[in-house]
Image: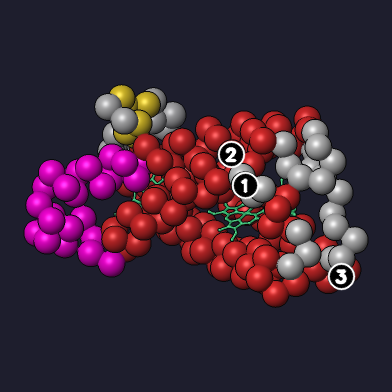
């Protein structure tokens, strides 16, 4: 690996996953605001079903790509942190990044299992993936609550992560952004 930035596969995965998480979050926020029935009456059955199908598809893709990303992180490592980082920045950025890894595995796993326990199909494009657990309405409700809480945690962590990235990029201008950038 070039010592001063993440390897190209790691940078591609970072931005690919970021895009998929943004799409899954956007659909999830619509589910939260409108609910299934609200979406049906506002947008019609076809759009509602497509939103659910592609929400699940994006989430399953995030899960698969996150596993690949963790394998690459463990085998290729990361470039050493910049000297310009204060001890507080080092601790905070590392904690937020590790919690993001954890939350982005837990979130789709909860979604998958909640869906299966609710008796709904785990859709991946036009396929239906194995549910892995049997139908159980009470368990499904608990897992959907955990899914919603994990999504909230991801939003909070992303707020900190993006604020930190923008601060380095636009205010400190210390080259942190370049480590993950696909350009220059
Ligand atoms: C859903 C969106 C995002 C997720 C899940 C995410 C997740 C992560 C994770 C887990 C890392 C740590 C990589 C590692 O050390 O293995 C990382 C690094 C990084 N991210 Fe993000 N990120 C997202 C969006 C963004 C955005 C929008 C920006 C810029 C505005 C950004 C800028 C960076 C930078 C610059 C690094 C490298 C930090 C370093 O020098 O170690 N990320 N991201
Ligand atoms: C990055 C991945 C994911 C994100 C960011 C995400 C985010 C969200 C959010 C914010 C909600 C609304 C929560 C609420 O209403 O309390 C939601 C609901 C939902 N998610 Fe996900 N999700 C992801 C992955 C998945 C996966 C993999 C599945 C299933 C295979 C799934 C299935 C569902 C379903 C069925 C709902 C609707 C729950 C309801 O209407 O009560 N999600 N998701």
What's the distance in space between the residues labelled 2 and 3, CA to CA? Answer: 27 Å
Q: Secondary structure at mark 1?
A: loop
Q: Which mark is residue 183?
A: 1
Residue 71 appearing in the image? yes
What's the distance in space between the residues labelled 1 and 2, CA to CA? Answer: 14 Å
Q: Quadrant of residue 12?
A: top right
- Location of residue 175 with respect to 110 vertically, above or below: below
Dominant SS of magenta comes to helix
**Label 1 vs 3, first from the N-terminus:** 3
Label 1 or label 2, whichever lies nearer to me, is 1
Q: Residue furthest bottom?
A: 171
Q: Which mark is residue 86?
A: 3
Could you tell whether 41 is left or right of 29 in the image?
left
**Residue 57 falls within the magenta-colored stretch:** no
Q: Residue furthest front?
A: 184
Range of residues picked out in magenta: 33-56
């Amino acid at each position: 690996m070039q010592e001063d930035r993440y390897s190209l596969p790691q940078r591609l995965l970072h931005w690919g996953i970021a895009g998929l998480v943004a799409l899954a979050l956007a659909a999830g926020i619509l589910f939260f605001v409108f609910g299934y029935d609200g979406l049906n009456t506002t947008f019609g059955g076809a759009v509602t079903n497509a939103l659910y199908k592609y929400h699940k598809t994006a989430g399953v893709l995030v899960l698969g790509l996150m596993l690949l990303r963790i394998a690459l992180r463990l085998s290729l490592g990361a470039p050493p942190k910049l000297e310009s980082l204060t001890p507080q920045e080092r601790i905070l950025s590392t904690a937020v990044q590790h919690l993001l890894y954890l939350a982005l595995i837990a979130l789709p796993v909860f979604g998958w299992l909640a869906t299966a326990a609710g008796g709904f199909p785990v859709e991946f494009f036009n396929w239906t993936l194995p549910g892995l657990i049997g139908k159980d309405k009470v368990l499904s409700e608990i897992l959907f609550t955990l899914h919603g809480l994990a999504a909230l945690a991801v939003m909070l962590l992303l707020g900190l992560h993006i604020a930190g990235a923008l601060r380095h990029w636009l205010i400190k201008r210390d080259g942190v952004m370049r480590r993950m950038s696909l350009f220059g």
